[in-house]
Image: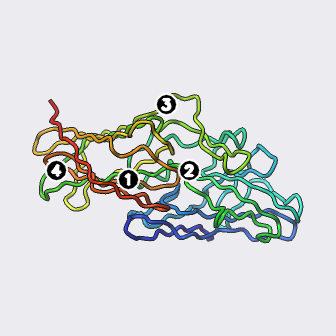
């Protein structure tokens, strides 16, 4: 069975990147278009993710939306046991010229054109890393000719599928082992961070971007736990979210409600920043002390790394 594997590579971070591998269809002799595809700098995608988060695998039945030059109607490609197969036969216009193709993942029915591709609803996330794949969105564009890759449109290398959203991981730790700390609610705020969007393939790659829809802006995502989650001594508690790539005017805000030693508290920070760039993994580590929350580190994984100073936050008992 021909499957597409993305193997994670451990470094200083949990997921520093993924090895690019390919799935391809063999080219026939009739000018039929074949497909190759890989994901660049993949942190997590809409695939099955293992418990350690170190490998992901596209499964049979996964589908890609594909646009050929000059057409607004999409063609669906599905991953089968034999590789990627298109729902209708596709052939090259000629075997000499170069053509530009666009594609996105996961496939969506009802797309009316390449400038209005619906994306997953980020407001429905639950914060679990294992479910990030349900909301991920990737896009690709490549220029290819029949001769370039033996008849295959190759979304690999510089043309590989790229993550459109920004991935945000927050790990909360405590400073004293043995202390019982349980989180009942976590909230992330920022203008338009979780709004419903659609993707536009523009005239050029420079104009490819997410665009807002007519739906109301979603500026807050709250995760409420019917059964409060414990902050473990060593690993703490982690939540993972996807957000729209934005440059906020005001700082984002993150807050938690929790119980320690039988007393309820809230803690809030507005210092997690304003910039959430597409295709980046922003990792924050917060330490919960008697005095409040301290931000002990930030990393932007995949393309850049940044470290910002520790930031202390006041702890406020709930009245």
Report the Cα–Cα distance between label 2 and label 1. 16 Å
Which residue lies at the image location 49% right of the left edge and 64% below the top edge?
56
Left or right: where does residue 275 sit relative to residue 225? right
Which is nearer the N-term, disc 3 or disc 1? 1
Residue 66 at what x, y percent from top left?
A: 71, 52
Residue 10 at what x, y percent from top left?
A: 41, 70
Residue on which the image places disc 1: 169
Pick the quarter of the image with the C terminus: top left
Please tell me in which quadrant of the rendered image residue 292 appears.
top left
The answer to whether 127 is drawn above or below residue 193 in the figure is below
Residue 225 seen from this side: no
Report the Cα–Cα distance between label 3 and label 1. 22 Å
Q: Are marks 2 and 1 in contact (CB under 8 Å)?
A: no
Furthest-front residue in view? Answer: 309
The answer to whether 283 is drawn above or below residue 15 in the figure is above
Q: SS for tag 3?
A: loop
Report the Cα–Cα distance between label 3 and label 2. 18 Å
Which residue lies at the image location 61% right of the left edge and 64% below the top edge?
38
| Label 3 crowd bin: few (<14), some (14–19), many (20+), radius 10 Å | some
Q: SS for tag 4?
A: loop
Of labels 1 and 4, the one closer to you: 4
Q: Are marks 1 and 4 in contact (CB under 8 Å)?
A: no
Colouring convention used in this rendered image of the protein = rainbow
Which residue lies at the image location 67% right of the left edge and 45% below the top edge?
207
Q: What numbered label is drawn on residue 289?
A: 4
Q: SS for tag 2?
A: loop
Residue on which the image places disc 2: 164
Left or right: where does residue 103 sit relative to residue 277? right
Q: What numbered label is drawn on residue 217?
A: 3
């Amino acid at each position: 069975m021909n499957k597409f594997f993305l193997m994670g590579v451990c470094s200083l971070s949990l997921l520093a990147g993924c090895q690019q591998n390919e799935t391809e269809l063999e080219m026939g002799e009739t000018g039929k278009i074949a497909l190759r595809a890989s994901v660049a700098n993949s942190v997590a995608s809409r695939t099955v993710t293992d418990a350690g988060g170190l490998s992901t695998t596209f499964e049979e039945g996964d589908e890609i939306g594909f646009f050929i030059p000059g057409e607004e109607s999409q063609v669906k490609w599905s991953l089968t046991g034999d590789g990627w197969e298109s729902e209708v036969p596709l052939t090259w216009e000629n075997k000499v010229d170069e053509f530009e193709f666009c594609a996105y993942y996961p496939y969506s029915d009802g797309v009316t054109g390449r400038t209005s591709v619906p994306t997953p609803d980020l407001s429905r996330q639950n914060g679990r890393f294992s479910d990030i794949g349900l909301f991920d969105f990737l896009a690709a564009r490549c220029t290819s000719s029949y001769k370039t890759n033996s008849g295959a449109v190759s979304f690999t290398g510089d043309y590989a599928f790229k993550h459109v959203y920004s991935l945000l991981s927050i790990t909360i730790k405590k400073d004293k082992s043995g202390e019982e700390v349980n989180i009942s609610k976590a909230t992330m705020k920022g203008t338009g961070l979780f709004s419903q969007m659609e993707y536009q393939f523009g005239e050029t790659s420079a104009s490819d971007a997410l665009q807002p829809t007519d739906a109301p802006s979603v500026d807050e995502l709250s995760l409420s736990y019917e059964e409060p989650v414990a902050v473990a001594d060593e690993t703490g508690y982690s939540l993972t979210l996807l957000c729209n790539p934005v440059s906020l005017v005001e700082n984002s805000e993150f807050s938690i409600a929790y119980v320690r030693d039988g007393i309820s508290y809230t803690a809030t920070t507005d210092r997690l920043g304003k910039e959430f760039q597409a295709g980046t993994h922003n990792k924050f580590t917060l330490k919960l002390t008697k005095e409040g929350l301290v931000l002990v580190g930030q990393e932007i994984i995949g393309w850049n790394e940044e470290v910002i100073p520790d930031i202390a936050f006041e702890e406020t008992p709930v009245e």
